[in-house]
Amino acid sequence: MAPAMRWDLEGLFPGGSRGEAFVAFLDALEGKIAWAREAFDAPLPEPGEERAGALWTRFDQLGMLFGHLREAGAFVSCLTAQDVHDEAAKRHGARLSRLSAEVGKLSLALDAALAEADAATWQALLRRAEGAMLREVLEERRMLARKRMPEPLEKLQADLAVDGYHGWGEMYHAFVGTLSVEVARRPGEAPERLSVGQAANLLVHPERAVREAAFSAYEATWKGASPLGAEILNHLAGYRLTLYRHRGYADVLEEPLLLNRMTRETLEAMWDAVVRKRTPLVRYLEAKAKRLGLSRLAWFDVDAPLPARKATIPFDEGAAIIVEQFRRFSEELAELAEQAFRERWIEVEDRPGKRPGGFCTSFPLKRQSRIFMTYAGTPDNVSTLAHELGHAYHQRVVDDLPFHLQRYAMNVAETASTFAEAIVTDALIEQATGAERLALLDDRLSRAVAFLMNIHARFLFETRFYAERAKRRLSPDELDALMLEAQKEAYEDALAVYHPPFWLSKLHFYLTSVPFYNFPYTFGYLFSTALYAEARAEGPSFHRRYRALLRDTGRLPVERLAREHLGVDLTRPEFWERAVEAAVADVEAFVREADVLPAEGER
């Protein structure tokens, strides 16, 4: 049977956003939270074994609540993605935010108790955790708690952040939603008033005249909005710096590194290897410029598609390609994909009312996942679907573990997905010829540019911005200058035109949930690239080590993860150098084939 193109949500909560099942689940969750609040408010026993037992019970209760919140959050994400006009789903989302805040307060209370635990209580608690593989998680929570302010101050900070820190972040989203760009979708047509998101889509239009006109209008819009944007960014950074000062953080990177379970030595080793080994990408950019008939690429040309003479890949054929290639690496991975297609975990139908983009979300209680995207039959769609199935496989590997061990950090969250995508992309490239093969190589190398150049520019800008913001507020012109400097450095001055107001157009700089939303992307990309290179060298036997590594992503710092499962030291440059070399390995093939392949329209 051909796989269905619409997912099944009825099997999760019948009736969807308007059904009684999900309302009952939220009601039950609210009751669990109230019950846990009473338990957490009770006085703790005297230090020693009894107090350790009480703390362990609270820790276990918190894990249960995390699992239920994830289940509910995943369902709301599916509902709002499949229908952006689903008001009932939005109301459920608002209720869930309030419940999440309540659980957050319980988490703070537990962490405060862990931080204050005496030696005898702590050792008794660790003995309970050892058999459940939760020792590292508890030690991490205690360490992070001891870096925070006293519990009353942290709770006050959390309350004030709603209309302060998070309020500034929400203001960014609200203000960007009011912006528009006047531009023609095609040469010769009358200009239209588009949202900035619609205008951004034109920056990858196949016709350069459209891209250039869209970029010019896009830049002008952001420049006009820069006074308010600078005000928001300065306040966000000022809040964060003040909070870090009161917590005693000596470095603005301390919190993001802690959240990603990695050391500064690893971060520096990674960026050092990137800077020294990414230079072949300049040759790729030059060859792409020549292919497009340009002397140098502009910012809006970097992701421009190359013409490819290809047939559309029907969804059932794309599914078959994925399962076949997954099976070459692992039977378990292939079976997961087959189950996802068979049980309708996947939503790919092209219809109005869906949100853009794609994601995979997991339901830890039901031990299922759901994948969302829109499928148009391109090779890139097939790769994206493989990527999201990789996320589902990661969850499958950990879904029998305690909920605390299923919470892996952002920098390793993309490991299984990028790995699965590489399996399928390799096969597509090997099977393709001519212009289609060149377009696939271009797509893969453009990802390397994104992670090794674009993301590095963001990191350079953000670190330098925070260093200056600690002394004073920065003007829009100063922010432009900082961004332009970072982009020229990261792209090795390979472009003819840059995008200085990127500090305003990139929402990642305004997210309040995750600080420094940049370097974890590059870490995950290179870590997965290195894993895939090792898998190709070792063959099918690598799957056992790979699976064991994924199971430990929720408990081990990345340095231990790599040392115990791969035998490598992430604080040294050698691992990262090999990863970058593998990431840019397609450059020679692209340059050679771009030079000999007739341009579009020639034979």
Image (tube, rainbow, N blue to C red):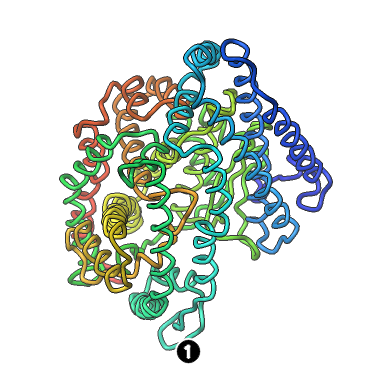
User: Foreground: 516 or 314?
Assistant: 516
Q: Position of residue 435 (x, y in %)?
A: 32, 59
Q: Quadrant of residue 340?
A: top right
Q: Quadrant of residue 487?
A: bottom left
User: Foreground: 558 or 452?
Assistant: 558
Residue positioned 56% across, 44% down in the render: 360
- The amino acid type, in three-letter code, at marker 1 is Ala
User: Foreground: 158 or 232?
Assistant: 158
Residue positioned 38% across, 74% down in the render: 226
Q: Position of residue 38 (x, y in %)?
A: 73, 31
Compared with residue 420, is residue 161 higher up or lower down, i.e. above or below?
A: below
Compared with residue 292, is residue 51 higher up or lower down, i.e. above or below?
A: above
- Please identify the quadrant where the N terminus is shown: top right
Residue positioned 75% across, 36% down in the render: 34
Q: Position of residue 392 (x, y in %)?
A: 55, 37
Q: Is residue 434 visible?
A: no
Disc 1: CA contacts within 10 A as few (<14), some (14-19) or many (>=20): few
Compared with residue 469, is residue 575 higher up or lower down, i.e. above or below?
A: above
Q: Is residue 443 left or right of residue 488?
A: right
In this rendering, the count of numbered labels is 1
Q: Is residue 386 left or right of residue 297?
A: right
- Please identify the quadrant where the C terminus is shown: bottom left
* Residue of label 1: 190
Spot the residue most to the right: 20
Q: Position of residue 305 (x, y in %)?
A: 36, 64
Q: Is residue 539 visible?
A: yes
User: Foreground: 560 or 44?
Assistant: 44
Q: Secondary structure at mark 1?
A: loop
